[in-house]
Image (cartoon, rainbow, N blue to C red):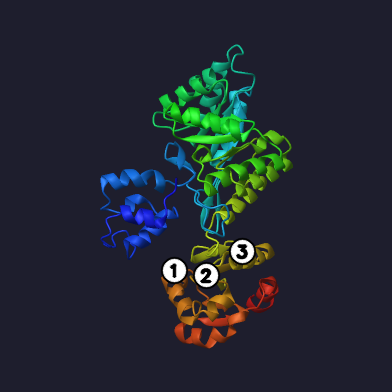
């Protein structure tokens, strides 16, 4: 049962030492009750109190991770249903599934481009999280264990990202033998028929285990049995695959875990949009799973044009809603500029950056783009807040060595802050300061008529 802030406070040392970065023990207790800090942040809590508080201080959704060779996909730790209440914690992992009925060459050809896929999104590296190997034909079919192990081996020959093993106990046992020491895979799925064998495998391999059932009551019964068998890292796998069914099941499980602190459902969720078959419907189901409330998402298709929007959606949902998405301040090259090309100035608000960059890049114009540190605000907002002025721009020109990149020292201000031109000329006396258009869409014409 969850403890209130006052109940937690009574178990703390009450010294107000401030070493937890809070002014009082009561303030720390309130944060602990809200699952927003860890008990370990208090250096002086007694062993007796720690034992009493440890269970109460655990997040309602148990944290866990699937690991391999330095890669890690974390799940759990969530404390709220909606991102406006508090920032979501762990981004769901996107996994590409292969089947053991495919040849080793086909598996490698499918895995390699997904493994290599990487894209820079406003200074954030995006990519696929890992791979799932599924037995295709049944655990008892002749040679099934060897075939499954061969599929796992084929994946491991081209990728070392985290892995999900989807099969019966015998095949999974063979697949585990192909993994390196120290890997933490996710085994899928324990059912009412095989949970004892699956739990024994997970416990022996120190792996996470997904449990699968048709109803929430059956999932509760399974998680209880598996946990009693010694497996702590559990993942919930409801069998509903329709948009409505999966949304209903995920929402009910997450609500019971968070609002009622119902521990048998306090685990991450796995979903299988790949079961839809059709690529477009699979992407829609994956998008829903990102928002509601999957920790692991298994897909059957990969292409840059489908992966990118899902990864960007995930990034947008799992960022702090009170902080705008920012581009890393610095100098960016558009269309391979040379020393005679102009320097365009903007702020590090992501939408502003992409608006300017896309217009210039699409027009074929070449430019250096100085993205000034304006704490993620748009041009007008930052200017009004005193975060984007001549001093800030001049400071970043020097900080990023812009003068070393160009011969023709031409710098273009956004039209909305034309008032800064005189001040910027004083800050940068060796530069020719120009005022560009107010809207990014007008930049190509401006650059052609004024700068060329």
Q: N-terminal of the two: label 1 or label 3?
A: 3
Is the residue under label 2 in contact with that under label 3 (CB below 8 Å)?
Answer: no
Q: Residue 402 versus residue 131: which sits nearer the camera?
A: 131
Query: Does residue 55 show up?
Result: yes
Residue 94 against residue 396 in the figure, above or below = above
**Residue tagged 1:** 400
- Between marks 1 and 3 in the image, the one whose residue lies nearer the viewer: 3
Q: Position of residue 44 (x, y in %)?
A: 25, 53
Q: Residue at x 46, y 40 (%)?
A: 65
Q: Residue 370 got which mark?
A: 2
Residue 60 location (% of width, % of height):
48, 46
Q: Residue at 53% across / 82% down in the picture?
A: 432
x, y percentage for residue 218? 59, 30
Q: Is residue 11 above or below residue 219?
A: below
Say which label, 3 or 2, has the lower sequence index: 3
Q: Quadrant of the C terminus?
A: bottom right
Left or right of 45? Residue 434 is: right
Q: How many marks?
A: 3
Q: Residue furthest top?
A: 142
How many neighbours does mark 2 have within 10 angstroms: few (below 14), some (14-19), or many (20 or more)? Answer: many
The reply to whether discs 2 and 1 touch (Cβ–Cβ < 8 Å) is: yes
- Residue 159 can be seen in this image: no
Q: Is residue 334 above or below residue 378?
A: above
**Classed neighbour count for the residue bearing mark 1: other residues with Cα under 10 Å, few (<14), some (14–19), many (≥20):** some
- Give the residue at mark 3: 354
Q: CA distance from mark 3 to mark 2?
A: 13 Å
Decide which of 413, 11 is in the foreground and name it: 11
Secondary structure at badge 3 equals helix
Q: Which element type, helix, strand or loop, lies under badge 2?
A: strand
Is residue 172 left or right of 27 when viewed as pictured? right
Q: How would you rate the neighbour count of disc 3 (Cα within 10 Å): few for under 14, some for 14-19, many for 20 or more?
A: some
């Amino acid at each position: 049962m969850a403890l209130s802030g006052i109940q937690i406070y009574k178990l703390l040392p009450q010294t107000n030492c401030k070493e937890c970065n809070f002014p009082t023990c009561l303030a720390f207790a309130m944060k602990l009750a809200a699952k927003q800090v860890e008990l370990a942040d208090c250096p002086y809590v007694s062993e007796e109190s720690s034992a009493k508080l440890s269970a109460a201080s655990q997040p309602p959704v148990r944290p866990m991770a699937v690991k391999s060779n330095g890669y890690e996909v974390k799940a759990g730790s969530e404390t709220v249903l909606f991102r406006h209440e508090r920032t979501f914690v762990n981004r769901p992992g996107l996994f590409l599934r292969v089947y053991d009925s495919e040849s080793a060459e086909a598996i490698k050809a499918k895995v390699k481009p997904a493994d290599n896929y990487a894209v820079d999104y406003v200074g954030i590296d995006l990519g696929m999280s890992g791979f799932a190997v599924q037995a295709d034909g049944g655990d008892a079919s002749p040679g099934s264990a060897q075939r499954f192990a061969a599929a796992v081996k084929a994946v491991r020959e081209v990728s070392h990202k985290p892995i999900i093993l989807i099969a019966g106990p015998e095949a999974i046992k063979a697949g585990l033998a192909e993994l390196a020491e120290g890997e933490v895979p996710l085994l899928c799925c324990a059912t009412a028929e095989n949970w004892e064998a699956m739990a024994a495998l997970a416990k022996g391999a120190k792996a996470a285990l997904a449990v699968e059932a048709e109803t929430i009551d059956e999932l509760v019964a399974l998680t209880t049995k598996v946990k009693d068998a010694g497996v702590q890292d559990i993942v919930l796998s409801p069998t509903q695959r329709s948009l409505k069914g999966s949304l209903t099941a995920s929402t009910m499980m997450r609500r019971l875990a968070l609002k009622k602190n119902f521990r048998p459902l306090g685990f991450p969720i796995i979903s299988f949009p790949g079961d839809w078959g059709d690529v477009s419907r699979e992407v829609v189901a994956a998008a829903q799973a990102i928002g509601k409330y999957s920790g692991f998402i298994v897909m059957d298709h990969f292409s840059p044009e489908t992966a990118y929007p899902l990864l960007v959606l995930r990034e947008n949902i799992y960022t702090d809603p009170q902080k705008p998405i920012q581009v890393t301040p610095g100098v960016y090259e558009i269309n391979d500029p040379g020393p005679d090309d102009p320097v365009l100035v903007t702020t590090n608000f992501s939408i502003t950056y992409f608006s300017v960059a896309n217009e210039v890049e699409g027009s074929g114009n070449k430019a250096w783009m100085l993205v000034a540190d304006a704490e993620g605000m748009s041009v007008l907002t930052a200017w009004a807040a005193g975060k984007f002025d001549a001093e800030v721009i001049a400071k970043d020109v020097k900080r990023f060595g812009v003068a070393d990149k160009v011969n023709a020292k031409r710098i273009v201000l956004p039209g909305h802050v034309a008032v800064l031109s005189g001040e910027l000329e004083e800050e940068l006396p060796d530069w020719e300061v120009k005022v560009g258009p107010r809207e990014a869409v007008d930049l190509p014409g401006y650059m052609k008529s004024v700068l060329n």
